[in-house]
């Protein structure tokens, strides 16, 4: 079973640092919730490919995953 639940998301914040960590944490929590709801169907599910695709601003500037 493959679930593309969170293919992309936009997150804005007041702070200039740490937003990508908050976005990754939120995505993982959402995926764990989906896993919990679907585990009766398939306990062999895996959560993979959670990563930052694009980021702008903050101390390190812009980042785009090629």
Image (cartoon, helix red, strand yellow):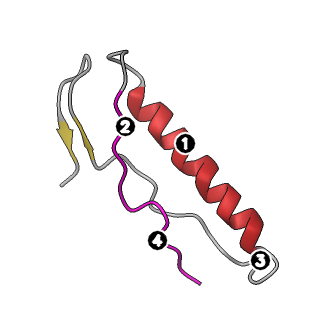
Q: Distance between the residues labelled 3 and 1?
A: 22 Å
Mark on residue 4? 4
Please identify, in this view, whether the residue under mark 4 or under mark 3 is nearer the observer: 4
Q: Identify the residue shown where x is 18% and y is 55%.
A: 66
Q: Mark 3 points at which residue?
A: 43
Circle 2/circle 4 CB separation < 8 Å:
no
- Quote the CA–CA distance across marks 2 and 3: 31 Å
Image position of 30 with respect to 45: above or below? above
In the rendered image, residue 24, in percent from the top left (x then y), is placed at 48, 42
Residue with the mark numbered 2: 11
Residue displayed at 25% across by 16% down: 59
Q: Mark 1 points at which residue?
A: 26
How much space separates mark 1 and mark 4, taking CA atoms?
15 Å
Q: Say which element carries label 4.
A: loop
Q: What stretch is highlighted in magenta?
A: 1-12
Compare marks 1 and 4 and give the one earlier in the sequence.
4
Relative to residue 39, is residue 28 drawn left or right? left
Q: Say whether residue 20 is left or right of residue 29.
A: left
The mark nearer the N terminus, 2 or 1, is 2
Q: At 37% across and 24% down in the image, what residue appears?
A: 13
Q: Do the residues labelled 2 and 1 touch (CB within 8 Å)?
A: yes
């Amino acid at each position: 079973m493959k679930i593309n639940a969170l293919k992309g998301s936009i997150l804005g914040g007041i702070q200039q640092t740490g937003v990508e960590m908050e976005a990754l944490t939120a995505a993982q929590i959402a995926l764990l919730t989906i896993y919990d709801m679907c585990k009766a169907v398939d306990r062999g599910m895996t959560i993979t490919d959670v990563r930052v695709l694009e980021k702008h601003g903050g101390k390190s500037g812009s980042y785009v995953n090629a």
